[in-house]
Structures are given as structure tokens and as C-alpha cells.
Image (cartoon, rainbow, N blue to C red):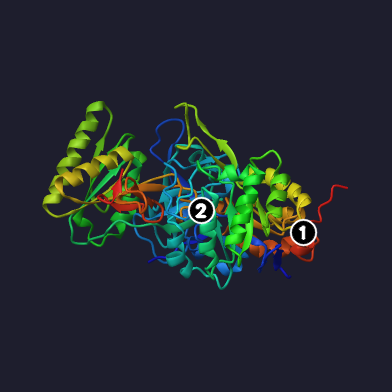
């Protein structure tokens, strides 16, 4: 079965050997999962969010399990883009699969600087712009909740990284996700990934305190799949650029549901914690699941959902 | 260096330890052999029974209690909803396990070695005592609250000397702390090795005395984990090194990847 998909962006196309990517923050820098499967068997992987300077992240506890999901408030801890380019990237199998850099900044200028730095790296196949992190005080979701700000960030990243496919990751914590999508499309985005986590919290009743040190965090996992499907469907009807669906995907069937409502590719996130070989298993089971769904390929299934 | 792997294992049996009431809270879970080529005492595994469904997405980290050619043993106490569900496992049920993960306790065959175990902290020392080439060089001090029969102490008694101190009244804790200090001082003088595993206050006590008396000590830390493989950054702990960009901040290490066993002077508890 031909599993290959091409995200035909307005500026750059990104061809993936199959539609299965892993979501930023759930897959480290890929190498952590190398003992459990062949990284080259994935369509690609999106590395942990990068910032211009090292970021310390939030205090602990940073994570908590919830019913059919989890909350995280890591706060984008990372060693900074220079460390990534010098130390991490050279050791990644970027010749064999797409390595996508997720980027975060607290100002438009910083987004530009970060994008320009990564534009020079041959090993980076695309940039995923994080304007939807609920766990950082500056930037993050404030860019992702205002269509004008989202467009400004997108435009700056596209200008600063002229050689890279630019994917913009949308937040579900908005009133009208279709309007956000349209706005980043108009600003030049090549593709859209949705959704990032939903803002949530958990309470320790005995102590009458929050279970996360940051009080609130991002909800992910199987419990958010219906919300994510709805968002992908709404975005698909609003824009012409390709969409990468993410949110609660655990099985190959889950992945195909996203593809059916309009995603060209998907990201596997929290499922990587359910079992470390989850993304590899989904990629492997995709052809059979596709056949069961009566489609000749994922590309053929894409966007065939109808409400008639 | 041992490469971890993930596999679906079969439950051979679940053996209750130390009947303390109508319900059992301590269990040895015997699983089919995962086929690991190598493991070292102090390392851990992520374990997720199939009966967690999608309701509980996380696996739980457990010390490797012991492994033989035939089986892998995990020892647990029922403390939350995950372990409660684990207490319902039956022979033939399946459990996804990935490991062996993380760092291990130092094994120095000819060095007098003191094991300090607090409660369930005894678990990794079962494997340690069995894998140590000269077990007569090891002795253990075991502080616990539940009756000794709740813990896997029999398999230790056959290999090493265990001094057991049960904490029943408030004064018992003072005795335990006093004894810990005495023993650490003794091992520091003979240039021995001190290894500790137990609850956080227990580890802090060991760390303080090890620093005071100049003992070489390793501590096994515990934390909430989602991935167990160093990816999610949920289990970070502070270190004595500084974080690159923030002069005022302690460095951060992933307990699952650089730990769970650290030299006592490396971590800030």
C-alpha cells in the first residue's frame, strides 16, 4: 500500500513516507524511543519544544494522571536551540525520516531569530510553530488566542525560515478555531497541526490544593479525542492547506478517523506513554486498518467524511 | 550497557504477603520472563496491566525485585487506584512491561556495604543481595511500619544479615534515626559503601548523615513518571550542579534516565 503523503503547503511541500508523526513533548528527541522501534519506520517525529535560550520549566509536580488522560505543566524545559543544533540534531536519523523542530518564543522577534537559526540546519525537515502552549506565562497561548497575533508570528517565522515548511500548531482553547486557522493560512502557513492540549486542572481534595504545582496544565490523551476530531473537521472546512490531526490517537483506527475528517497526517502523543512502541505499532497497522475501512490508501481516505 | 525492550508478559501468580486484615495490601507479582539479556539491581521497569484499559493511561514504575531464568518479580503495596487494580490480577492476565531502565546501585565485591531500606525500599535490595558476588560483605538495616512478613524479607535472610527495626510508637523513629547515624559513621570509618532506598524523609536523613560523616552513599529516588524513558520531563529532580542559563537555579535531572540511583552528593532533596 502506498502510505506516502505530501503536505502541499503554500510555500513548501513536505513529503512523509507515511502519515504517522509523534507529537512534540511526548517523544523527547526521538532517540529515547529508539530501543522500542525503528525511528525510520515513522513518517517523522516532532522534537520537544525548542526556545532560543535554555528554559528551566515549571516546578514539580509537573504531571498528573486523570481519567483516560493526563495533565502536564512541564513549562517547555529545554537546553536551547544552540545545544539542539550542535549536540542533539547531528545524532538524529534525519536522513531516514522527517525531523520536525517545534519552536516556542515569548516575542515575535524571538520567533524570527529562532526560525532563522533552524532554517540553516539541513537536518530539520520542517518547523512546527507552538503558539498554543498553555503552560508558559509569556507568549504561548496568548499568540494562539488572537488571530492577529497568530498571523504576525506565522508571517515572521515564514520570512525568517524561507527554506522550511512551516506548520502552525493551534490551541483548542479558543471560541472559533476555524477563524484562527484561516488567519494563519492567510499569513503564509504551509500546514496546520491541531490540537494542542486543553487547559485543565486536578484537585487534591484531602489537602484542598492543586495536584500540579502550576495549578493548571494541558489535558491530553484518549479523553480529548472527540474535541480534537471536531477541531480538525472545523478547520478542514475553513482552509485549503493540509492539516495534521493530533489528540488522543491510540490505534490505527483512531488515526484514520482524523484522516477521514480531513487530516493529511496525524501525530501520536500521550499514547507513547501507554506503551513506548505505540507510534511504531500504529504506523505498522495502518495499511490493514485502511483496508478494513475500505480505502486504498490514507491519501484516498483523506477528507472523505460526509454528514449526508 | 543493557538495552531496554518492551514486551507483553503473562501473570504467573500474585502472592499476598503478611495477611494484615480482611484485605491484602502487599503482593509479589510473578511475571513470565521478558527475555532481557542483562539487568542490574537498582534498575526499574515500567509496568502497565492490560486491565488498566484506557482509563489509566500511565504505566507505573517499579523496582526490579528479582529476575531468574524463569520469571521476573515485582513487589508492590496497594496505595492508589493503579496498585488496587493490580491486586486484582489473575494468572494468565497480561501486563506490558518495558525495562530494564535507569541506573543501578554500585556493586563493589570487597567493600563492606551497608543497605539502608525504609519500608518498600527493601525491594531492589532483594536482587542486590542475590546478584552480589560476596554477600558476606553486605549487611542491612531495615526500618518498617508494617509487620516484617509484609515484605520480601525471607529471600534476603537467606543471603545477608538483616537488622530489622519496626516503628510502632513515636520513640521508635528516634531509635531508627540514631541507629542509621551510628551505622553510617561506622561504614564511613571503614571506607565502606552505603546504599539507601525508602521514602523521601528517610533518604534525606541518610543524605544528611552521609555528608556529615563523609560516607560514600547512593540514594534511590522515586517520582511520578509518565514515560519512564527520559522523554516527558515529568520526573525531574534538582541536582547540585547549576542550570546553564539561570545562576540561581539548581540543575535538573530526569530521575528515570540519570537515576533512579544517584550519588548522595549529586542531588538536592
Q: B139 and A288: which one is in front?
A: A288
Q: CA distance from mark 1 to mark 2?
A: 35 Å
Displayed quadrant of residue A1:
bottom right
Neighbour tally class for label 1: few under 14, some 14-19, many 20 plus, Cα within 10 Å? some
Q: Residue at x 50, y 65 (%)?
A: A34
Task: Note whether residue A115 is visible.
Answer: yes
Image-based side of A82 in relation to A224, left or right: left
Q: A109 and B101: which one is in front?
A: A109
Q: Residue furthest right?
A: A308
Q: Residue at x 59, y 46 (%)?
A: A132
Q: Is residue B263 above or below residue A11?
A: above
The subunit carrying tag 2 is A
The reply to the same-chain question for discs 1 and 2 is: yes
Q: Is residue A292 above or below residue A65?
A: below
Q: Which residue is mark 1?
A: A302
Q: In terms of secondary structure, where does tag 2 sit? A: helix
Position of residue A270 measured from the top left corner of the image (x, y, whole percent): 57, 50
Position of residue B87 measured from the top left corner of the image (x, y, whole percent): 50, 41
Q: Which residue is mark 2?
A: A110
Q: In terms of secondary structure, where does tag 1 sit? A: loop
Position of residue B134 measured from the top left corner of the image (x, y, whole percent): 22, 60
Q: State the count of labels.
A: 2
User: If you read the primary sequence from the N terminus, does the residue marked by circle 1 or circle 2 appear first?
Assistant: 2
Q: A232 and B33: which one is in front?
A: A232
Amino acid at each position: 500500500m502506498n502510505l506516502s503523503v505530501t503536505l502541499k503547503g503554500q510555500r513548501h511541500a513536505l513529503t512523509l513516507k507515511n502519515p504517522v508523526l509523534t507529537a512534540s513533548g511526548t517523544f523527547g528527541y526521538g532517540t529515547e524511543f529508539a530501543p522500542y522501534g525503528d525511528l525510520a519506520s515513522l513518517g517523522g517525529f516532532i522534537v520537544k519544544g525548542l526556545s532560543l535560550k535554555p528554559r528551566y520549566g515549571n516546578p514539580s509536580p509537573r504531571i498528573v494522571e486523570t481519567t483516560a488522560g493526563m495533565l502536564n505543566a512541564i513549562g517547555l524545559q529545554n537546553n536551547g536551540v544552540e545545544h539542539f543544533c550542535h549536540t542533539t540534531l547531528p545524532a538524529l536519523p534525519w536522513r531516514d525520516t522527517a525531523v520536525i523542530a517545534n519552536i516556542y518564543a515569548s516575542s515575535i522577534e524571538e520567533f524570527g531569530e529562532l526560525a532563522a537559526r533552524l532554517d540553516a540546519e539541513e537536518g530539520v525537515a520542517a518547523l512546527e510553530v507552538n503558539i498554543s502552549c498553555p503552560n508558559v506565562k509569556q507568549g504561548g497561548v496568548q499568540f494562539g488566542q488572537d488571530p492577529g497575533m497568530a498571523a504576525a508570528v506565522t508571517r515572521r517565522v515564514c520570512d525568517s525560515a524561507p527554506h522550511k515548511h512551516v506548520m502552525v500548531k493551534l490551541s483548542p482553547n479558543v471560541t472559533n478555531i476555524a477563524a484562527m486557522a484561516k488567519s494563519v493560512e492567510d499569513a503564509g502557513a504551509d500546514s496546520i497541526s491541531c490540537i494542542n492540549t486543553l487547559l485543565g486542572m486536578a484537585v487534591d481534595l484531602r489537602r484542598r490544593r492543586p495536584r500540579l504545582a502550576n495549578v493548571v496544565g494541558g489535558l491530553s490523551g484518549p479523553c480529548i479525542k472527540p474535541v480534537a476530531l471536531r477541531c480538525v473537521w472545523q478547520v478542514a472546512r475553513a482552509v485549503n492547506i493540509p492539516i495534521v490531526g493530533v489528540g488522543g490517537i491510540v490505534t490505527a483506527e483512531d488515526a484514520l478517523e482524523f484522516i477521514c475528517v480531513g487530516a493529511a497526517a496525524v501525530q501520536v502523543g500521550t499514547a507513547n506513554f501507554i506503551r513506548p512502541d505505540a507510534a511504531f505499532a500504529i504506523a505498522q497497522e495502518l495499511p490493514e486498518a485502511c483496508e478494513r475501512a475500505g480505502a486504498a490508501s490514507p491519501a484516498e481516505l483523506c477528507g472523505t467524511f460526509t454528514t449526508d | 550497557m543493557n538495552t531496554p525492550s518492551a514486551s507483553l508478559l503473562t501473570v504467573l501468580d500474585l502472592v499476598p504477603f503478611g495477611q494484615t486484615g480482611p484485605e491484602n495490601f502487599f503482593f509479589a507479582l510473578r511475571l513470565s520472563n521478558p527475555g532481557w539479556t542483562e539487568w542490574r539491581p537498582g534498575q526499574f521497569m515500567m509496568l502497565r496491566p492490560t486491565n488498566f484499559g484506557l482509563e489509566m493511561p500511565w504505566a507505573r514504575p517499579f523496582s526490579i525485585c528479582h529476575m531468574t531464568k524463569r520469571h521476573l518479580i515485582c513487589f508492590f503495596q496497594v496505595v492508589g487506584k493503579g496498585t488496587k487494580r493490580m491486586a486484582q490480577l489473575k494468572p494468565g492476565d497480561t501486563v506490558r512491561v518495558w525495562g530494564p531502565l535507569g541506573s543501578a546501585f554500585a556493586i563493589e565485591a570487597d567493600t563492606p556495604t551497608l543497605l539502608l531500606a525504609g519500608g518498600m525500599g527493601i525491594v531492589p535490595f532483594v536482587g542486590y543481595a542475590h546478584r552480589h558476588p560476596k554477600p558476606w560483605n553486605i549487611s542491612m538495616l531495615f526500618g518498617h511500619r508494617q509487620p516484617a512478613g509484609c515484605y520480601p524479607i525471607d529471600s534476603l535472610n537467606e543471603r545477608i544479615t538483616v537488622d530489622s527495626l519496626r516503628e510502632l510508637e513515636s520513640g521508635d523513629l528516634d531509635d531508627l534515626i540514631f541507629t542509621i547515624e551510628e551505622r553510617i559513621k561506622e561504614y564511613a570509618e571503614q571506607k565502606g559503601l552505603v546504599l539507601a532506598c525508602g521514602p523521601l524523609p528517610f533518604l534525606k536523613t541518610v543524605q544528611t548523615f552521609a555528608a556529615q560523616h563523609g560516607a560514600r552513599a547512593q540514594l534511590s529516588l522515586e517520582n511520578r513518571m509518565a514515560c519512564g524513558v527520559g522523554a516527558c520531563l515529568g520526573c525531574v529532580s534538582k541536582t547540585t550542579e547549576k542550570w546553564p542559563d539561570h545562576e540561581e537555579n539548581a540543575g535538573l535531572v530526569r530521575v528515570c534516565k540519570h537515576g533512579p540511583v544517584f550519588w548522595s552528593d549529586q542531588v538536592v532533596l
